Image (cartoon, rainbow, N blue to C red):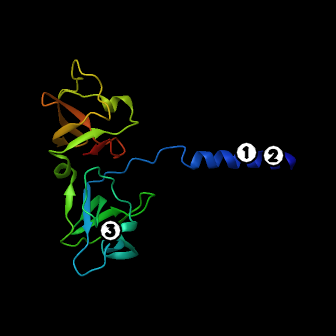
Amino acid sequence: MALIRTILPVICVALFVAVSGAASPPRPDTGIGVLLVCAVPGEPTPPQLILYGEPGIGRIAEKSAATLPHLPLSFKIPSGEFPLVVTARKGGWLKVIHDDAGRAAWLKPRRAWPFVSWDELLKGREARLLRGLKKPFYLLWGSGGDMVPDLEPLTPERSFRIVSVDGDRIQVLLDLAVVGWLRWRDEDGRLLIALE
């Protein structure tokens, strides 16, 4: 019994340290695009969202758009707009991530709330890689899968322009002279870039 009283506080402290922020927050899931929820004139701000288990069936909750996890886009978003990650579409319904655990639910978007695919959102924008990624994510690749010669690995401080999007890869332009390919999301669908 004395051994348990001695070991139990050590285990609790170890668990607290392991859970309480020793790791950085996870990079956000990307899904298939972004829904920009915005206030409609004459209605409460932020808007209330009715969430369903399936489109129109099995109401889960009614939540304020401000309480849902927002995609941390680096470019300026007008006050009162909430970018939500969309993971699927079915008819006129969109499945959005509604909590920090990554659970998703369906909602019927209003006409004033634009859905933007990643292709539309990324193309033509300036971006840079996030900090703390694995080394291969910082390498610029040619179209044939070969590393671009004579180019140092990119750094999070170096920005680039996104020329085109092909699945999980983006074609980028560096210093108006070098063109190559990078991944913009990893195998798990998590962001690797920050938009400027």
Residue at 23%, 75% (x, y): give it: 40
Q: Earlier in the sequence, mark 3 or mark 1?
A: 1
Which amino acid lies under the numbered mark 3 shown in the image of this protein?
Trp
SS state under label 1: helix
Circle 1 is placed at which residue position? 10
Left or right for 9, reference 86: right
Q: Where is residue 72 in the image (x, y as percent from the top left)?
A: 33, 53
Left or right for 98, reference 17: left
Give the camera-side residue of 196 and 189: 196
Q: Do residues under tags 3 and 1 come within 8 Å of each other at their CB atoms?
A: no
Circle 2 is placed at which residue position? 6
Find the residue positioned furthest to the right: 2
Find the residue positioned furthest to the bottom: 42
Which amino acid lies under the numbered mark 1 shown in the image of this protein?
Val
Circle 3 is placed at which residue position? 106
Residue at 14%, 44% (x, y): give it: 124
Left or right for 14, reference 62: right
Which amino acid lies under the numbered mark 2 shown in the image of this protein?
Thr
Give the camera-side residue of 100 and 89: 100
SS state under label 3: strand
Dot 3 alpha-carbon crowd within 10 angstroms: few under 14, some 14 to 19, many 20 or more: many
Kindly report the distance in space between the C-alpha atoms of the residues bearing marks 3 and 1. 43 Å
Kindly report the distance in space between the C-alpha atoms of the residues bearing marks 1 and 2. 7 Å
Left or right for 174, reference 186: left
Residue at 20%, 47% (x, y): give it: 122
Give the camera-side residue of 74 and 169: 74
Displayed quadrant of residue 183: top left
Q: Position of residue 53 (x, y in %)?
A: 38, 70
Q: Do residues under tags 1 and 2 come within 8 Å of each other at their CB atoms?
A: yes
Kindly report the distance in space between the C-alpha atoms of the residues bearing marks 2 and 3. 49 Å
